[in-house]
Amino acid sequence: MPERVSEYRRIAVLGGVYANAEALAAVLADARRRNAEAVFCLGDLGGFGPDPAGVLPLLRAHDVRVVRGNYDDAIATGATDCNCGYTDPRDNHYARLSYAYTVAHTPAADRAWLATLPAQRRVQLGSHRILMCHGSPRRINEFLWESTTPDGLLRRLLADYSADVLLCTHTGLKWHRALDDGIAHAVNVGAVGRPENDGTPRVWYALLGAEPDVRVQFVPVTYDHESVARAIEAEGLPREFAETLRSGWWTTCLENLPAKERARGRF
Amino acid sequence: MRAMSVVDAPTPRAPFVALSTLWLVLTGTLCNLRCTHCLNTSGPDAPWLPPLDGAVARRAIAEAAALGVREIYFTGGEPFLHREILPLLETSLAIAATTVLTNGTVLTDATADALAALARASRYSLEIRVSLDAPDAETNDRVRGAGTWRRAVRAIRALDARGLLPIVTATEIDGAPDAYDRFRALLSGLGIARPRVKILPVFPVGRAAGDSAARLSDADLEGFDRTALQCADTRAVAAGGVYACPILAGLPGARLSDGDLTAARRPAALYHAACLTCHRTGATCRNA
């Protein structure tokens, strides 16, 4: 029996909550104000931030449909690390602290729920077939950076997975590419839990509409980042995480950034 | 048929998933240096693995693009000894993110300027990986040759000054646990704001080949996701054929086709001692 696919005209899509419930609340309120018919989250609910337990109640309250991220997968299965793929001991040090904190502060019921999340979701946006995933449709922790994702790869993924629009996250940096005169699209929706290494504390999500062509709008959201930074410090999480929320510059886990993306940051 | 004897029935295999990474062994084993751990025994003498013809490299890039390749890497030998390196990089950067692995010792300011221009003109990242095996000249030069530290550091500065953010790539010659920190300290001391370091294990192949008979077995791989191995989504084009990975390029046991990437999309034999290192360390020859 063919999968039942819901149809929409206007949706909000976010990713990378990273246990930043304050930012998530601000983004969900913004999406409601902008009349999104439905909100989707592409995973990675934990890590980095101070409030893993505060995320799921918000997602439920706003009826957000969630795709499983690699972090969610690791938490759900009791993996020994986040499967982020760092090799630099400095990055691994921060990743371990963050992961241990998230494990310790994720309620057992939330872990069980994470295990039920699908790896992909499909919806119809007007006449366009949308495929949502975390990293890439072929691997949950594949980084689709703007500067390392060729048009040819995107065309192949869209063909292999029978979609017109591919939505992903995992990198924490947003981008959108229209292919073939706007017939096909790839969108990395960025992250709401951490600023995007641009020197401002704002975070981003994406609004997609069918007008009737696909329209992609990235929306910046400000929130009380100072209170989250203080909570990070109060919880004994690395000061570098708080610094990132305040300054907007990434301070840790930089090794996976390709040259073009790395050059835009301070560190 | 001789190659078949080393890839016979008990040899485990890695499935082929997709062509994500293409390696071009551009100069074969032609290099101006003769590093003591070189995994394909490169050097200035007549190379046992000849350089790639530019037309062959271009054909491979085009075929890889059609197969949906994600990243392209140029290696050798020393790729900047190939007279077509710059136009080939331009071709590659038109379709995908591209990385060059260099020892940095033949990189001139004019070449650095040209690389910066290529990087600016492409929507995809150009990465330059400069090999340096120790943060200090004495240790490095024992491995890589006299004067190589000074020349490589000069190249690192020249690339960084042009916004290219080189990745210093070291081989784990002494297994020092603070190696990353020491390389970062070196780069910070050079005034590099965004220090990038990658450290790879020594592979038991080429000049570092030992006499260990240990090989991977299917039992070793039980419960292990073989698609996580490099050879599940990587192919290396070298003179004479397409190989499972860049470490084993040129070796008969790793040869998968005579030059056709499409035909090389089949399982690779995990027959070499280096396959054991790859599996045990989880190392990737990719940038990340």
Image (cartoon, coloured by chain):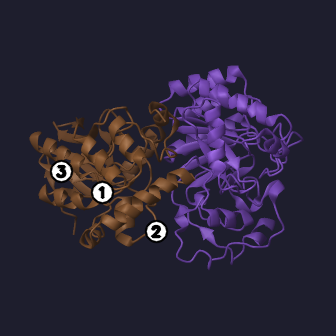
Q: Can residue A126 be seen in this view?
A: no
Residue B280 location in percent, x, y? 63, 67
| x, y percent for residue A41 | 25, 53
SS state under label 2: loop
The amino acid type found where label 3 is placed reads Val
Q: Mark 3 points at which residue?
A: A39
> In the image shown, does A60 or A231 lie closer to the viewer?
A231
Q: Nearer the viewer, mark 3 or mark 2?
A: 2
Marks 3 and 2 close (CB-CB < 8 Å): no
Q: Report crowding for label 3: few under 14, some 14 to 19, many 20 or more residues within 10 A (C-alpha).
A: many
Total labels: the figure holds: 3
Q: In this view, does B186 lie to the left or right of B94?
A: right
Quarter of the figure with the N terminus of chain B: bottom right
* Colour that chain A carries in the picture: brown
User: On residue A45, which mark appears?
Assistant: 1
| Rendered position, B61 above or below B210 | above
Query: Which sits earlier in the primary sequence, circle 1 or circle 2?
Result: 1
Q: Nearer the viewer, residue B223 or B227?
A: B223
Q: What residue type is labelled 1?
A: Leu
Asked if badges 1 and 2 are on one and the same chain, I answer yes
Residue drawn at x 58%, y 42% is B72
Sooner in the amino-acid sequence: mark 3 or mark 2: 3
Residues marked 1 and 2 touching at CB (< 8 Å): no
Residue A253 visible from this viewpoint: yes
Task: From the image, state whether disc 3 or disc 1 is nearer to you.
Answer: 1
Residue B118, labelled with which disc?
Answer: none
Q: In the rendered view, tell whether residue A87 sits above or below residue A33.
A: below
The chain containing the residue under callout 1 comes to A
Dot label at residue A80: 2
Callout 1 environment at 10 Å: few (<14), some (14 to 19), or many (20+)? many
**Chain letter matching colour purple:** B
